[in-house]
């Protein structure tokens, strides 16, 4: 019985670590997506500005 509890405990710790890592990756992905969106908007703004000046 003690071995089963150790295995369950190890599995729970691993699951917790994976959930934490997943959350960090989701947050990083959101930041990267926000950055890409900002870059896309900035590039198009500059392109439009150049077209009106040219």
Image (cartoon, grey):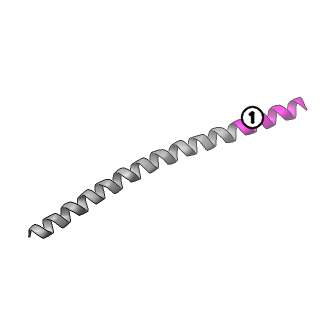
Write the residue at 34% across / 54% down.
19
Task: State the SS at label 1.
Answer: helix
Q: Residue furthest right?
A: 54
Q: How many marks?
A: 1
Q: What secondary structure do most residues of the magenta stretch adopt?
A: helix
Give whichever of 54, 3 is nearer the camera.
3
Write the residue at 35% across / 50% down.
20
Q: Indicate the position of residue 13 as horizontal and vertical percent values.
A: 25, 57
Write the residue at 13% across / 65% down.
5
Q: Indicate the position of residue 47 as horizontal and vertical percent values.
A: 80, 37
Is 3 above or below relative to 30? below
From which residue to which does the magenta span run? 42-54
Give whichever of 24, 53 is nearer the camera.
24
Where does the C terminus fall, quadrant-wise?
A: top right
Q: Indicate the position of residue 33 as horizontal and vertical percent values.
A: 57, 45
Q: Is residue 46 left or right of residue 9?
A: right
Asked if the stretch drawn in magenta spans residue 41, the answer is no
Is 11 above or below relative to 19? below
Give whichever of 43, 10 is nearer the camera.
10
Q: Check disc 1 and report the residue beneath it.
A: 45
Asked if the stretch drawn in magenta spans residue 51, the answer is yes
């Amino acid at each position: 019985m003690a071995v089963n509890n150790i295995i369950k405990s190890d599995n729970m710790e691993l699951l917790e670590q994976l959930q934490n890592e997943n959350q960090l990756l989701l947050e990083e992905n959101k930041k990267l997506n926000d950055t890409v969106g900002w870059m896309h908007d900035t590039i198009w703004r500059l392109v439009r500005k150049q077209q009106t000046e040219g």
